[in-house]
Image (cartoon, coloured by chain):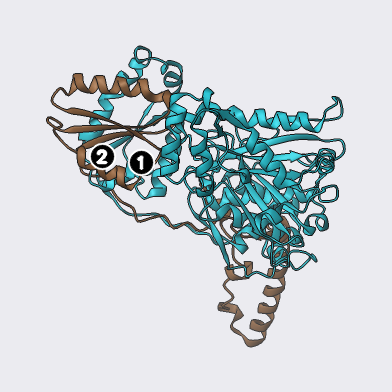
Chain colours: A cyan, B brown
Amino acid sequence: VSGYYRLEKLGKPGVYVCTDNFVHDAESAAEDVGMPKSRIVTVRAEDYYRLRGTDAGIMPVAEAVIDELIDGLKRPLTSEEASTTGAKEDLGPLAVSAESYRLAIEKFNSIYLDNQWGDGLTLLPPTKEAVQEMLKGTSRSPDEIIGTVAPKNGVATVEKIAINAVMAGAKPEYLPVILTAMECITDPDYDDLHVMTSTGSFNFAIMVTGPIAEELNINAGIGFLGYGWRANSTIGRALRLALINIGRVWPGVNDMALVGRPSQQFYVFAENQKFSPWQPFHVTQGFKPEDSCVTVSSVMGASSHLLGGGAVATWTPQEILDSSVRMMKEPRWGMATWKRGSSNPGPMKYILFFEPVLAMELERMGYNRAGLQKYLYEHAVVPYEELTPAEIANVQPRIDSGEIPKDRISIFKGALKPGGKLPMLDRPEDIRIVVAGGIPGYSFAMSFWREGLYAPTSDQTKLIRGATLTKAGR
Amino acid sequence: VLRSEQIKPDSGHILDLIDLKPAGIFQGAFMKKFCIRAFMATAAVVFTIGCQSSNDVTLEVLNPRGEISLPPVSAPSTRIADLAGKKIGLYWNEKPGGIHFWNGIEQLLKEKLPETTVLRYSGPFDLGKEYAAKIAAETDAFFYGVGD
């Protein structure tokens, strides 16, 4: 709706068109941009998606709305549409009374869940005392603003995040991790809006690295993306609740993920430093080995690219590297139209989850992280002779617009001649390698856009600080 | 929307509801003192019973929602009563799923409003400041759609 709003603000009368299943999303977005009475016309979703494949097929849908569209441009605004009065809301505490504690809990849950202030599971009441106890986990001020959360840019203070952490059942010592993850998600350079509202099932992968992971017993071994660990589950749930309540997002209203966002508690896990032959991941991002950090990445789904491993089949490290290269060549379909700011903004980034045995084998073969990144970058290429004219033509605009890093321009230009090889990734650092899982384990990848749609980045690593109940993260 | 009966704070203290001002036969000093004490004792019993039967537990819970600062509300632009001779822009983001629908809208506009000009535009979800200025300069009104 933001584009519609720009044109209206420039004095041009317009009509926003969407399917009826998206009207709540459009109305919510119109409120967000400051034009809640935008003119919106809907088409029937079941007809639109069924018939849109051809000009002739979709014509009855267009015919059904054309008069309404024209009317939307001509009909004068009503006094309600012309009103510029905004609404205010009360965010103060609520008193919930009942004959017993059990009934009070029931009543509290009814109120919060009926009003979409929860995730559908039973919540713990965020009493003042419980929130104060939660806040003991950090030395940071309750009033400190961590950032604003999409889509409605709700203000995330330490206290508001703590309230949601209480509701999630998190322990106070988890709070510094939760706050750091929120710092990542709300960083102005991070595109949280797309991940939280897209029709695709994007989600956040939240990796905890450094000594705090072991102190908090965050699972890094067998089952690391599954259930059973309080830290993994409630850190993720606290973040989900914080995004629902602070960002004001809700399925079918302004979160339009068509099949939802599994897992609903995100993918919270720790790097398996115990078995990793390499330094913690955050060292690759400029932090010290002894630091504890959180890395948040916008991913397209867990285990979407299985690379190999497991308890059944045999495998070799080379087979898994070959599998990784094949995966990185798959986005070739969009290569000719990569363009920053579009819905096909550029090459993928990858998180490669290497299970411990593979990592140790690769180390024995002489690879470190940088060596593996270089190997994969140099092998995930398309020979010049196989490039289409459109793929060749799209390289120079990407160089001119600054999408291709300066230190890589010579490689891309050199690829555009006989014998050249055009990389599928913009730089080796776009391959993130982490050691996670148990023994045996699977190696797999999660992928995400290098560029966000609404903000420049789709991953962030930040230092955990302010912890008071753990040795690490202080 | 939050139901008001659910969030209404507890009723005030039961003694707040009782008028303790003595009157009539209770105006003598002893009787006054006695009656007030008796009344207070009775009221305390009533209060206790009342609490046990209705509001034994009160949870004061904090609001989990973040404060939002919505931008100042703007009204849509003034409409155009007569579109004859005007230029209407059709904006669609570049995804292929919507192309045929907008082809149909363009065709119907030309049939129903033969004296208008239809201009097609495409780009990202949010067309951006510069592109918006260009379209605004070239058109009088517009239809806008984005999606998959």
Disc 1 or 2, which lies upstream in sequence? 1
Name the residue beneath numbered marker 2. Answer: B135
Residue at horizontal 30 percent and vertical 51 percent from the top: B74
Q: Quadrant of residue A17?
A: top left
CB atoms at circles 1 and 2 under 8 Å apart? yes
Residue closest to the eye, B90 or A23? B90
A99 on left or right of A244: right
**Residue A272 in the image, given as x and y percentages of width and height:** 81, 48
B6 above or below A291? above
At label 1, counting other C-alpha atoms closer than 10 Å, the crowd grade (few under 14, some 14-19, many 20 or more) is: many
Q: Look at the image and tell me in which quarter the C terminus of chain A lies.
A: bottom right
Q: Which image quarter: residue A174?
A: bottom right
Q: Circle 1 marks a residue in which chain?
A: B
Q: Amino acid at mark 1?
A: Leu
| Disc 1 secondary structure class | loop
Q: Position of residue A448 (x, y in %)?
A: 59, 39
Where is mark 1, residue-wise? B127
Q: Nearer the viewer, residue A109 or A335?
A: A335
Kindly tell me whether residue B76 is visible in this rendering: no
Name the spot of residue B19 as percent of width and height, x first. 57, 72
Q: What is the crowding at mark 2: few (fewer than 14 residues within 10 Å), some, or many (at least 20)?
A: many
